[in-house]
Amino acid sequence: MEQDSKQGMNLMMPILFALVLGGGIFIGTKLNVPFIQERSIFSAGSSHFNKFSDVLTYIQQEYVDTIDREKLVDASIEKMLQTLDPHSAYIPAEDLRQANEPLEGNFEGIGIEFHLQEDTIMVVSAISGGPSESVGIRAGDRIVMVEDTLVAGVNITNADVMQKLRGQGGTKVKIKIYRRGVPKLIPFTITRGKIPIYSLDASFMINDSTGYFKISRFAATTYDEFMQASIEMKAKGMKQMIIDLRGNPGGYLDAATKLADEFLPEKQTIVYTQGKSRPRTNYDATSTGEFENSKVVILVDEGSASASEILAGALQDWDRATIVGRRSFGKGLVQEQTILPDGSALRLTIARYYTPTGRSIQKPYKDGYDQYNNELNARFDHNELLSADSIQFPDSLKFTTPGGKIVYGGGGIMPDVFVPIDTSGRNNLFLIEAINNGAISQFAYDYVDIHRNDLKAYKDYKDFDSRFILNENIWNDFVKKASAGNIKHSAAEIAEAAPYLKNQLKAFIARQTFKNGGFYPILLKVDKTYLKAVEEISSNQKVNASTK
């Protein structure tokens, strides 16, 4: 028996060896060996053990190549915050000022709006009251030299231009410009200063009683800009208004709450926030309200987020406004910014926003960062942008306003009046090409540059709108320039795109001549959501009065 056992063991040894070897290979592939077993540099049992810091030190000391420790720390923090939610973020010191400028309402520079035309910096306009205007820079000027360095014909980028022309207030920059009709370059020395960034893109009277306001973001200056414009509009007879928040990504909370306060009676809740470590905080309307009895329509779409949703949600919940458009983005997480010693910043989510009825604005993000960012594509795939009936919410997300209207939570603000996205021309290759290659704005820049003196004949945008004809010569010139490469477009395809593109061209020419004040009144003439809002506010249907 013993002999048999030994023989059996001898027969099994190769098999056992093979299994051990095979198992080792399998485990090795999972652990990505080979590796060198070495002493541990970590003191796992020590009270001073810090996993993140110790691993980082180990990498810096022992990694095969030299590493940039600061870059590795930044990347690690950024990735760590991404695992929490889609809106917690890390901002490196060099990016912080640029990230804050649009919300602060100003930046420091020379004060021009520019466009890169044929690899040259063309001044679209000198900002009113800014340093460039004060020294005589004009629309149409080309910046050729900056501090004796050639900047024309050298493949300069937008980022390069801003780096060269922006700078601390009080510092000087020397430039040389080419101006049509002047044989030599003209030198200027410009002292940089604070340049306002406006968040109210446009405000104008639609008719004798209705005003229109386009708010691009909620910045530190938004409330003051809006109130100043409303004073001017009320003097013209404004009694009701359309507030366009489409594409508005949000901004400062108090900018939205201060504006909402103007439409709501005292003590009505505008929004409240609540988080694990932050008790419920209510933001309530005060006793002052300039527009408590004004009829209001608010436009939203899938690009309206955060502070935009706070304003729209508050006025919808109190039956103070009709919301027109498509479901808003669904950003209802509150970030608190903390400045770190090296000048970088953390924006950490510390609470959620809730509308007055208790709706959470935030859409789900449990499926990860990438899927969250692609959610808008999913809306299109599910036909949500085309049909309100495709949007289904469970009963648990239904809320009722004081006026008895059903509103929905679960992500974004659902409009009271749904307007599908305009898909006309989506299969028109000429239209798509003209938009994608920037042909519309480029043609407008070129046209205004050539006909600048002729356009001075129009006293304002209304005069321009009534008298300027985009004739066949202009249209044919555009068609020729807009057709890129060897793509041939049929006459039928071009004719189908013509009404939309002609309106766009006229609007962009008006923008170069009269800025946004001339752009939006023309652009909106074919905007279906805007036209529906005008129809709503002009109807005899009254928005329910708010309740105390």
Image (spheres, helix red, strand yellow):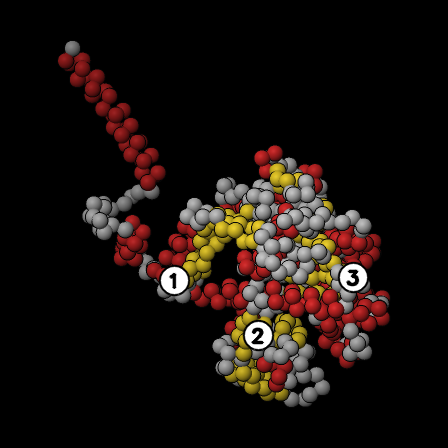
State the residue in front, 454 or 480.
Answer: 454
Q: Earlier in the sequence, mark 3 or mark 2?
A: 2
For the residues marked 3 and 2, what is the alpha-carbon distance in whole angstroms? 33 Å
The residue pinned by badge 2 equals 195
The residue pinned by badge 3 equals 209
Q: What residue type is labelled 2?
A: Ile
Please say if 464 is above or below 499.
below
Of tags 1 and 3, the one toward the viewer is: 3
Question: Disc 2 on helix, strand or loop?
Answer: strand
At label 2, counting other C-alpha atoms closer than 10 Å, the crowd grade (few under 14, some 14-19, many 20 or more) is many
Give coordinates of residue 385: x percent, y percent. Answer: 68, 45
Q: Which amino acid does label 1 sit on?
A: Leu
- 402 vs 424, left or right, is left
The residue pinned by badge 1 equals 340
Say which quadrant the N terminus sits in. Answer: top left
Q: What residue type is labelled 3?
A: Ser
Which residue occupies 51% across, 83% down? 172
For the residues marked 1 and 2, what is the alpha-carbon distance in whole angstroms? 27 Å
Q: Label 2 near label 1: C-beta < 8 Å?
A: no
Give coordinates of residue 213: x percent, y percent. Answer: 69, 62
State the residue in front, 125 or 22.
Answer: 125
Q: Which of marks 1 and 2 is nearer the N terminus?
A: 2
State the residue in front, 245 or 406.
Answer: 406
For the residues marked 1 and 3, what is the alpha-carbon distance in whole angstroms? 50 Å
Give coordinates of residue 127: x percent, y percent. Answer: 63, 76
Question: Disc 1 on helix, strand or loop?
Answer: loop
At label 1, counting other C-alpha atoms closer than 10 Å, the crowd grade (few under 14, some 14-19, many 20 or more) is few
Residue 541, numbered circle: none
Q: Which of marks 1 and 3 is nearer the N terminus?
A: 3
Q: Label 3 near label 1: C-beta < 8 Å?
A: no
- Residue 53 showing in the rendered view: yes
Give coordinates of residue 131: x percent, y percent. Answer: 59, 81
